[in-house]
Amino acid sequence: MVRPRRFRRVLSEPDVTFFKPAGIRLVDLEEIVISVDEFEAVRLKDLNGLEQSDCAKKMNISQPTFHRLILSARKKLAEAIVKGKAIRIEGGHFQLSSSQKTCVCHDCGFSVPKERGKPCFTFKCPECSGRMVWG
Ligand SMILES: [Zn+2]
């Protein structure tokens, strides 16, 4: 059993969740998955230019944790750009601070944005196949 991790606070889920390099067939593409919390780290630090301490506070995590998160996100983005891979943004240990709803795994705390008309209990946790409940 995986110990539940503290949720990382994310303002809202990304508008675009899939990026595909031009001129490469989808079947020939490798995909890099960036979690929604990694996406939020890049948004706060690299796009908005906030201090790392402020980013960590906004996401309700420690500075070392934020540092690991942003490094992991940047490495994935770099790999996608350099090696021409597609980028998919999904999943992660986060809780939305906006009005959007999330479904959270009862067992490991993994969360995904709730889809309209798709109750949380109708699917299993992508990480551990645990029971999903309202976040
Ligand atoms: Zn789970």
Image (cartoon, rainbow, N blue to C red):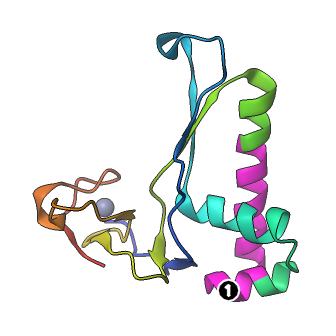
Element at label 1: helix
Looking at the rendered structure, the number of numbered marks drawn on it comes to 1
Q: Is residue 21 left or right of residue 131?
A: right
Q: Is residue 63 visible?
A: yes
Q: Is the residue indicated by label 1 positioned so its CB lies within 8 Å of ligand 1?
A: no
Image coordinates of residue 53 in percent, x first then y, are: 82, 85
Image coordinates of residue 33 in percent, x first then y, are: 55, 42
Occupied quadrant, residue 58: bottom right
Asked if residue 113 lies in the magenta stretch, the reply is no
Q: Residues within 10 Å of mark 1 (few under 14, many from 20)?
A: some
Query: Is the magenta region chiefly helix, strand or loop?
Result: helix
Q: Nearer the viewer, residue 32 or 116?
A: 116
Occupied quadrant, residue 128: bottom left
Look at 18% across and 66% down and name the residue there: 120
Quarter of the picture containing the C terminus is bottom left
Q: Is residue 116 above or below residue 99?
A: above
Image coordinates of residue 28 in percent, x first then y, are: 54, 10
Q: Is residue 83 left or right of residue 17?
A: right
Q: Is residue 90 left or right of residue 29?
A: left
Asked if residue 73 lies in the magenta stretch, the reply is yes
**Range drawn in magenta:** 55-76
Look at 63% across and 81% down and name the residue there: 59
Quarter of the picture containing the N terminus is bottom left
User: Which residue is identified by label 1?
Assistant: 58
Q: On the rendering, which quadrant does ligand 1 occupy?
A: bottom left
Look at 27% across and 70% down and name the residue there: 107
